[in-house]
Image: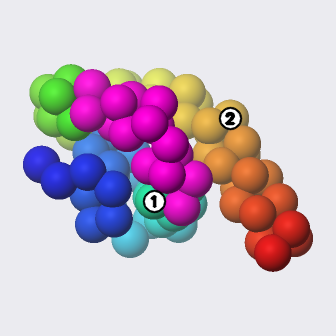
Amino acid sequence: MGMGKGGKCFIATAAYGSELAKEVQVLRGFRDERLCSTIFGRKLFQLYYQLSPSIAEYISEHRGAADIARVILRPIIAFARTAMREKKDSA
């Protein structure tokens, strides 16, 4: 799997049911514009792309797991929105 722009958000897509879900778009934008611009972010996503396909498959097959994943993702998405807003405000 590729990293950075165009890479997949496996877990969020499984949790929200579509790559087009606004939550997935927020996470993808945060990844592409903020995280993957740092060495730490790129290393984090190398690990993510190794582990996330099997987690996403489990989430896709278990409705309760999708519900739990959305609860876990909610504060991450809120943080990503705030970080992206701050970036726009500082530009």
Residue 31 pos. (x, y %): 47, 52
Residue at left offset 33%, top offset 65%: 5
**Label 2 amino acid?**
Pro
* Left or right placement of residue 79 versus residue 76 in this view: right
Q: Which mark is residue 32?
A: 1
Residue closest to the far right = 89
Please determine whether, in this image, residue 39 is positioned above or below residue 90: above
Please determine whether, in this image, residue 51 is positioned above or below residue 12: above
The residue range painted magenta reads: 33-48
Residue for badge 2? 75
**Label 1 amino acid?**
Asp
Q: Disc 1 and disc 2: Cα gap in Å? A: 19 Å
Helix, strand or loop at label 1? It is helix
Q: Nearer the viewer, residue 11 or 63?
A: 11
Residue 79 pos. (x, y %): 72, 42
* Left or right placement of residue 30 versus residue 83 in this view: left
Q: Earlier in the sequence, mark 1 or mark 2?
A: 1
Nearest to viewer (mark 1 / mark 2): 1
